[in-house]
Image (tube, rainbow, N blue to C red):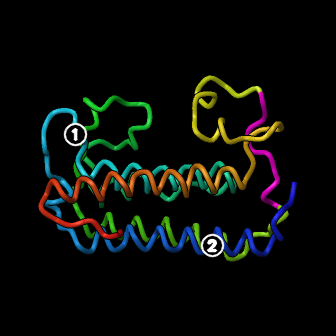
């Protein structure tokens, strides 16, 4: 099997994360709170869910990758005023359809803080760290059914898997939801 030079792999990941974050910034700047908190109908999550879920999950996943404490805390909650102070990963759609953002500007500040921290870390990471195993096999039940478990190599989920699955792939998935939901509130998608 051929392997990519470490520098090429790192450069690609840095550019993809930066570009994806840019799509999130474009999305939040082209929507207002009425778009983000719009309730379409039962079973359809509001944009507020996708925005907070992904940002908060990137914050939590960053801790699993780096050991650095998440940014989100009670002070951020009091500023952003999420209706449900939870990313919702282990909650049902019926519970999370009630997710709303209270202070949109504070949310955007939280989002930028999380995204900047990730990009700053990637700007300094030693590519040799990509092979460090974060979760070994056999995986615990909560991990075993995840996308990252399906992608993992024989040793388990590595730092690179974490960046690729937990941050990049997960972010694109929710950006797709946001782009679709923008049509429900009368806005256009952002990419072709």
- Where does the N terminus fall, quadrant-wise? bottom right
Q: Position of residue 153 (x, y in %)?
A: 78, 41
Specify whether 40 is left or right of 107: left
Residue drawn where x is 51% and y is 55% of the image: 58
Q: Nearer the viewer, residue 102 or 144?
A: 144
Extreme residue in the top direction: 141
Q: Position of residue 46 (x, y in %)?
A: 23, 47
- Mark 2–mark 1 distance (CA, rounded to whole Å): 32 Å
Above or below for 108 versus 160: below
In the image, which residues are magenta? 129-137
Q: Nearer the viewer, residue 86 or 20?
A: 20
Q: Position of residue 190 (x, y in %)?
A: 31, 70
Instruction: Specify whether residue 133 is painted magenta.
Output: yes
**Residue of label 1:** 44
Residue drawn where x is 60% and y is 50% of the image: 165
> Local crowd at mark 2 within 10 Å, few (<14), some, or many (≥20)?
some
> Local crowd at mark 1 within 10 Å, few (<14), some, or many (≥20)?
few
Q: Position of residue 89 (x, y in %)?
A: 43, 37
Specify whether 148 is left or right of 128: left
**Residue of label 2:** 14
Q: Check disc 1 and report its element: helix, strand or loop.
A: loop
């Amino acid at each position: 099997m051929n392997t990519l030079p470490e520098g090429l792999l790192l450069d690609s990941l840095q550019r993809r994360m930066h570009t994806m974050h840019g799509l999130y910034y474009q999305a939040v700047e082209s929507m207002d709170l009425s778009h983000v908190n719009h309730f379409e109908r039962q079973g359809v999550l509001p944009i507020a869910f996708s925005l907070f879920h992904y940002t908060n999950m990137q914050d939590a996943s960053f801790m699993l990758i780096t050991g650095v404490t998440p940014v989100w805390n009670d002070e951020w909650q009091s500023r952003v005023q999420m209706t449900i102070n939870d990313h919702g990963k282990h909650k049902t759609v019926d519970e999370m359809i009630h997710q709303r953002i209270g202070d949109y500007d504070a949310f955007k500040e939280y989002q930028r803080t999380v995204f900047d921290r990730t990009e700053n870390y990637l700007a300094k990471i030693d590519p040799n760290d990509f092979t460090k195993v974060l979760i070994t096999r056999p995986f615990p039940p909560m991990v075993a059914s995840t996308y990252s478990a399906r992608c993992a190599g024989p040793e388990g989920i590595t730092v690179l898997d974490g960046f690729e699955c937990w941050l990049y792939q997960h972010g694109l998935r929710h950006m797709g939801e946001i782009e679709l939901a923008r049509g429900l509130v009368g806005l256009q998608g952002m990419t072709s």
